[in-house]
Image (cartoon, rainbow, N blue to C red):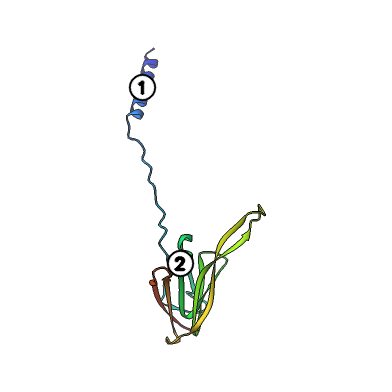
Amino acid sequence: MIKVIFFLVIFFCFNTSIIFSQKIEKIKFQKNTSTIYFYQKGVFHDTISENFGNSFYLLVPDSIKKDIAIFIENGRLTKTSNDSIVKLYPMPGLNYESQFLIKEMVSELDYKKIQKQFQLISLINGTSNVQKDKIIIKITSKKENGIILENTFFYKN
């Protein structure tokens, strides 16, 4: 009998401690839809070559992809199989402009649905007056006509 009373007291104390304990608060994170990330994959170097240091992460929210342009002097950005990694190839004496265009594709599961995806394209934009071993990357806003981000790298054969 004492064992039963002991277990009832323990059970009652345990339940009341749960009832009067603090509630668990949930932490909510808001996605920032205006942040652009452009940084080197791996160890950061200001000098790149065709085989070393030319891979970059380019993360742009879909909400602003249509509003940015990337200007590269003495270089060209190309997409890779990973949608967030781009390669920077030296193109001495040339300017390139990269931007995201919407490509409509038919859904594999439902042929009546059309999916819209952004694709990065790079087009030649003239000649460069910058010294040939210097690559300048400028990410600009089309809406505000201003520079969002500017990086300078040096090219080494």
The residue type indicated by label 2 comes to: Asp
Q: Closer to the camera, 147 or 27?
A: 147
Q: In which quadrant of the rendered image does the N terminus lie? A: top left
Left or right: where does residue 64 sit relative to residue 81?
A: left
Residue type, label 1? Phe
Residue 46: image location, x then y, percent: 41, 77
Q: Is residue 156 above or below residue 18?
A: below
The residue that appears at 46% across and 76% down in the rendered structure is: 71
Identify the residue at the far right of this view.
Answer: 111
Q: Earlier in the sequence, mark 1 or mark 2?
A: 1
Instruction: Say which residue label 2 marks.
Output: 67
Q: Position of residue 51 (x, y in %)?
A: 52, 77
Q: Disc 1 and disc 2: Cα gap in Å? A: 62 Å
Q: Quadrant of residue 18?
A: top left
Q: Is residue 90 left or right of residue 112?
A: left
- The residue sitting at 46% across, 71% down in the picture is 69
Q: Nearer the viewer, residue 34 or 152?
A: 34
On the image, numbered disc 1 is attached to which residue?
12
Disc 1 crowd rating (10 Å Cα; few below 14, some 14-19, many 20+) is few
Between 92 and 3, the residue placed more toward the observer is 92
Residue at left 64%, top 56%?
107
Which percent across, then down, holds residue 10?
36, 22
Task: From the image, state whether disc 1 or disc 2 is nearer to you.
Answer: 2
Q: Secondary structure at mark 1?
A: helix
Place of residue 122 in the rendered image (x, y in percent of width and height, measured from the top left): 53, 74
Q: Secondary structure at mark 2?
A: helix
